[in-house]
Amino acid sequence: MAPLMQAWVVNQPGPIDSGPLRRVEKAIPQPGSGQVRVRISVCGVCRTDLHLAEGDLTPKHPRVVPGHEVVGYVDRVGLECVRLREGDRVGIPWLAHTCGICRFCTSGRENLCIAPLFTGWDLDGGYAEFAVVNEAYAYRLPTEFSDQEAAPLLCAGIIGYRALLRSNLPAGGRLGIYGFGGSAHITAQIAQSQGARVHVVTRSADAQALARGLGVASVGGADAVPPEPLDAAILFAPVGTLVPPALAALDRGGTLAVAGIYLSDIPSLNYEKHLFEERTLQSVTANTRLDGEEFLALAAQIPVRVTTTPYPMDQADEALRALAHDRVDGAAVLINAEP
Ligand SMILES: [Zn+2]
Ligand SMILES: [Zn+2]
């Protein structure tokens, strides 16, 4: 019989308090051609994992292992690998595969590939002891960051960076951030390092304190209106009712980027108040590998300070509950015991 590992699977998607995840024993995966196997040290907990567990995102296959902010060490190398060797520290991100030949892949927009695969949705992810990854999609991680600090960079960080790019924030501009968790607290630091004035709107008192600690220009509660018009805004909270006030807070020509993969319904918009004067509502879809490489280099250079709340791997369900109920400071991460 194949050796087994402990892993969490999405057993029965539903409200997080109904226990949609189950801890099971699974065969340790074997790397295929062009793949490496990673012994997982830490896996970050992303809001997308919560959407998957709760059924907001339809599972691509039953009993998938969630988790796409995976930090670990290569312990087996498949045939035809050229980049990675046994012992390398690597990160496994959300983007697991693209076709390489569609009109998006061939024009620098592989994030819009028509046949992509995603870690922890199509392919088993990091809520486990081992995972395999196509080596071409794994990242080498800057030595500035511990395993625990590096994990949230892999989705929260990279997607936040792409959202910042898509928000078209001008140099030295005024940026609004709606919702302040794992992704936002990293993105705010990137923006500030580029001279932005950052205004944070978030309901949780802990998140407000985290924002203040980063020296942002202003912090307000859920219904707050930033004290000056915004050149750009990023919506991190998966809450569609925040779209109209965030658009209304933009200056002429401003852009609101929606960072999440899931958003509850957006109420009807008023053209004059929310969109006229060339305001733009912009979605963000995954990322390219280039976005990831750029972001990791930038994060190391600043260097970004990553705030994490650690949980043992066997408490992944509790970590997701804490995220659902706004009880996580910065980014939650799941830690495997030392082998
Ligand atoms: Zn493609
Ligand atoms: Zn994610």
Image: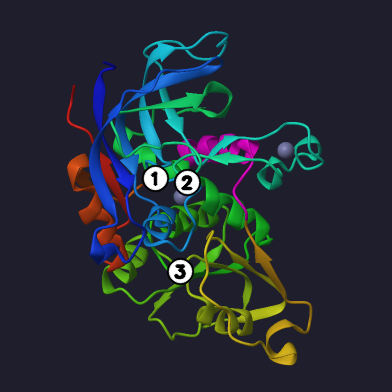
Q: Amino acid at mark 1?
A: Pro
Q: Position of residue 275 (x, y in %)?
A: 73, 82
Q: Report the magenta residues as a range.
A: 285-305
Between disc 1 and disc 3, whose residue precedes?
A: 1
- Mark pair 1, 2: CA separation: 6 Å
Mark 2 falls on what kind of element? loop
**Do the residues under discs 3 and 2 have CB atoms within 8 angstroms?**
no
Location of mark 3 (residue) = 237
Left or right for 142, reference 324: right
- What residue is drawn where x is 40% and y is 57%? 47
- What residue is drawn where x is 32% and y is 50%? 11
Specify the principal SS of the magenta part: helix
Location of mark 2 (residue) = 155
Residue 243 tag number: none
Location of mark 1 (residue) = 152
- Does the segment drawn in magenta span residue 296? yes
Q: Position of residue 1 (x, y in %)?
A: 26, 15
Say whether residue 111 is visible. yes
- Mark pair 3, 2: CA separation: 15 Å
Q: Position of residue 242 (x, y in %)?
A: 52, 79
